[in-house]
Structures are given as structure tokens and as C-alpha cells.
Amino acid sequence: MDYKDYYKVLGVEKTATPEQIKKAYRKLARQHHPDVNPNDKGAEQKFKELNEAHEVLSDPEKRKKYDQFGADWQRYQQQPQGAGRPGQPGGGFDWGQYSQGGGFGEGGQFEAGEDFSDFFGSLFGNMGGRRAGGNRPGAGADFQAELELTLEEAYHGGLRTITVNGKNLRLNIQPGVADGQTIRLRDQGSPGRNGGPSGSLLITFRIQPDARYARTGDDLTQDVPVSIYKALLGGEQTVETLSGPVKIKLKPETQNGTRLRLRGKGFPVYKKAGQFGDLYLRLTLTLPQNLTAQEKELIQQLAALRPEE
């Protein structure tokens, strides 16, 4: 019977914290879940190995026993050939000190159950719970999906339909969701085992870049082109925002790169009705092109009035 490296199965170090073990298991379980990989025997076997590894490493008592066993197993493997195999009479490795009573049938053979390997049963026996009988309730695996939104869709929120594993789900998206934000829909994952709770559906939002606005948290920044004449003489200008057009007043001699702040014209604060970030306007002066001879002459006259510049 070969030794199973549960840490390698989950892709974690032996010093991994319970949180790191849980995170690694969830990620791999979603990837190899039979519902996501129908008729894939390799994925089904991998999913069973992941469950077995998680069963051991997520339980402090089992993990301690497994770690102690692993150290002794390494010492056993370093013995000269012919010293015997684990569990064999005359071997140099005392398997009996680790095996649990009640886990073996006649002739010292482990009574195979439906979930875990013989290695697991030989080490833990009835301690495994699901190994003997397989009737312990267990939570279903989580599913994961992504939903792409434009910046305007994230701003306004509203109803969207997403299809996961052939099932259409209608979502009411709250205004103000952020790129990379994940929401959880309970009971929309894989069904639980033996009456256990279903898993969840984790939906991650991906917000498309917008050519008009740059978003920082709940604030927006927008470049606003302004003619050189309006910048010099001042006046009103209409600016399009996500909540509609807004008129702004420009002071005479407004400089290129001037920033204006429009309070409450930014992004809605997620799940806080009526609260918004700010919109920052960055004024960029535009120069006239295709000047006529008369325009050039007037500009030259203006330049002559301010020779120091």
C-alpha cells in the first residue's frame, strides 16, 4: 500500500494554515467537480483524492496523526530492502500503532467504503466517518462564474441573466459593484451529500474599461476638452456625466490641466442608497487647426503684445 501525500494532492506546504488548506481545496474542488466535468473519470478520481486530503488536513486530530505517521513512514522507507512492508508480519514498520479498531475485516483486510482509499482506512479506520458507510452529511462544492459589465451597467445596476451549468439565474445587481468583486448566491452550487447543504455560486464581476472615465474606488476622473478661446475668456460648458449632462462655469484664463471637483457625481457607493463618490474633471485645452491668413495675423498681433512670453 503506497503512502499518500495529502499536502501534494492539495498543492500546499506542510506548514500551510487551515485557511490556506481550505482555499486550496475549494479552488481545486471547483475545477475537478464531477458536475463540471461530466463523464470524466480522471476528474472524478481527482475529486475523490481532494476530498480525502481535505478530510485529513482540515481536521486537527487527523492531521496530527497523519503528520506523525508520515515521519515514521519516511524512516521506514530508509530501511534496507527486505525489512518488510507496512502491515506485513515481520516488517520493520509497526502499522498497528496507527490503525483504528473496527476498520478491518477478516484476514486483516480493510473493509472498503465508497469515498476514501484503503490508505485512509488503514490509518484512520472508523475515525474517518464517511469511509465506513459513507452516510455522513456533507456540503456540496461551490461553483464559480464571471459576469462582464460595462461601467454604465455597474453604475446603474439592474437585472441580468447568467447561465451556469445549464441553469439560467436572474440577478438583481446592486449599483456600484467593483471590478473583481465577488458575490455569493447560497444553495446554487453542487447539491450536498446525504442531506447536507448545497454549495454556493460565486460570481465575480469584471468591469470593462471605459474610454471616458477612470475609476478609483467610488470616484471618477474625466478629461474635458476646452477650446482655447473659452479658457481665455471664460464661459459655460456642458459636461456629460453618468447621471446626465451638467453645466460648469469656467473662469477667465483657465489653465490647461486645471482640475474641477463635482461632488456627488461619481460612482454610487455599493449598498448605500443615495451616496455617491465625486467626479473630477481634468480640463485639456484644444488648439485651433487649419488657421486662415486672417487668424494667423491676429495671433501674431496678440503675440506681439506679450513679447516676454
Image (cartoon, rainbow, N blue to C red):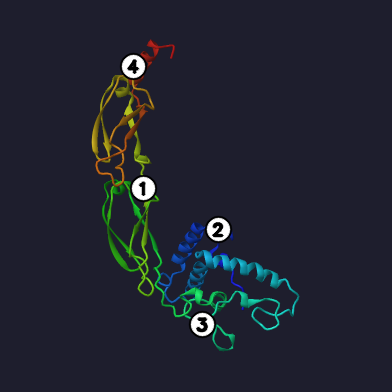
Dot 1 crowding, Cα within 10 Å, few <14, some 14–19, many 20+? many
Sequence-first disc among 3 and 1: 3
Amino acid type at mark 1: Ala
Q: Which residue is mark 3?
A: 112
Quick one: label 3 or label 2, which is nearer the N terminus? 2
Q: Position of residue 43 (x, y in %)?
A: 48, 72
Q: Looking at this rendering, what residue extends furthest in the bottom direction?
A: 106
Identify whether 119 is placed above or below 300: below
Q: Whole-Å distance between the Cαs marked 4 and 1?
A: 51 Å
Q: Amino acid at mark 2?
A: Ala
Crowd around label 3: few <14 · some 14–19 · many ≥20 (10 Å) = some
Residue 164: give x, y in percent of width and height: 34, 65
Which residue position holds label 1? 178
Q: CA distance from mark 3 to mark 2?
A: 30 Å
User: In the image, which is nearer the foreground, mark 4 or mark 1?
Assistant: 1
Dot label at residue 16: 2
Residue type marked 3? Ala
Q: CA distance from mark 3 to mark 1?
A: 49 Å
Q: Is residue 42 visible?
A: no
Residue 151 in the image: state x and y as whole percent: 33, 46
Task: Find residue 255 and report its image quarter.
Answer: top left
Asked if the residue at tag 2 contacts the one at tag 1, i.e. Cβ–Cβ closer than 8 Å, the answer is no
